[in-house]
Image (cartoon, rainbow, N blue to C red):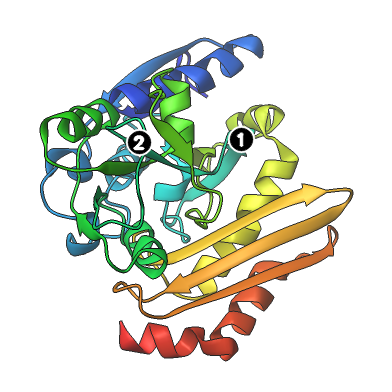
Amino acid sequence: MSSPIRIGTRDSELALWQATHVQKKITSLGLESVLVPLKSEGDKNQIKPLYEMGVVGVFTKVLDTALLNHRIDIAVHSMKDVPTQLPKGLVQAAVLERESPLDLLVFKTSELDFSKSLTIATSSLRRKAQWLCRYPHHQIVVLRGNVNTRLQKLKTNDWDGAIFAKAGLERLNIVPKNSVDLPWMTPAPAQGAIMVVAKNENPELCKLLSKINHQKTAQCVQIERNFLRTLQGGCSAPIGALAHITNDEIHFTGNISHPNGKDTVVIEKTAPIQDKALGKLYAEEILSSGGQRILEQI
């Protein structure tokens, strides 16, 4: 194990915050570390919608490659960006305690009349599909860039609102006053969670990193990612999943929507926390309940 530990991260402000958060936890273990910022393909192209880029792991590939090439020792990812199948040779070393998994609507006026024809900005196919399902008379426009860039674009364009991951705005302490949670919108699998990836050939480091792993978060996001993986959807597919633990039970909501918002299937389930195969089971159930029809259409 090298010292200091080289922590790979994207170079955006939010990614650096997440990497620094991991760094502090590593420091608490008595270990030295240094950040190694890198720019991903998703960061380089901030115009094209993510779902049109045709690359799984568009935000994670550069870090995983650096890890496999021994340029860094660990990689810190927003877990919702991580493909459900890690590259050969890499393992999930830790998942930090999840913050809010919710989506958040930021708007420019003191309040919005949703009965009117509004223009809402997002680059997420999932958010677009679920929004149009609820508000089919609204228009969706593409919004790319880091968090601050997107907030600025909202100010300078003739849009009514934009959708963000609440956790990202909270981490940077920039949640606008004119914003509202979207509890009806099923978030992306693992949204709000941070994953630390390492090489499986480094068991000593993996053992140390297991000390910062948050077990309940890891269990919930694994169910969500197994749901996504069984449905064979990438991180930009119109699939949502959220699991949380209450009183030794797993509460799960899953969603598949057509990108045009005209067809959607939702399931809500509760099961004992001990059940290990929930994500796969729930995916198979939603497929048989109409999800297969939607996937075939898209």
Identify the image quadrant of residue 225. Answer: bottom right
Could you say which is closer to the camera, residue 134 or residue 150? 134
Q: Which residue is mark 1?
A: 206
Identify the image quadrant of residue 241. Answer: bottom right
Residue 229 percent across, percent down from the top left: 50, 69
* Residue drawn at (19%, 27%) of the image: 152
Above or below for 269 versus 213: below
Q: Which residue is mark 2?
A: 106
Q: Secondary structure at mark 2?
A: strand
Q: Amino acid at mark 1?
A: Cys
Q: Where, quadrant-wise, is the C terminus in this rendering?
A: bottom left
Above or below for 119 versus 180: below
Q: Is residue 98 visible?
A: yes
Could you say which is closer to the camera, residue 227 or residue 69? 227
Q: Is residue 74 visible?
A: no
In the image, is 254 to the left or to the right of 54? Answer: right
Residue 124 percent across, percent down from the top left: 31, 55
Could you say which is closer to the camera, residue 188 or residue 264? 264
Residue 145 percent across, percent down from the top left: 20, 37
Q: Amino acid at mark 2?
A: Val
Q: CA distance from mark 2 to mark 1?
A: 39 Å
Above or below for 146 versus 48: above
**Circle nearer the N terminus (2, 1):** 2
In the image, is 131 to the left or to the right of 123? Answer: right
* Residue drawn at (36%, 79%) of the image: 262
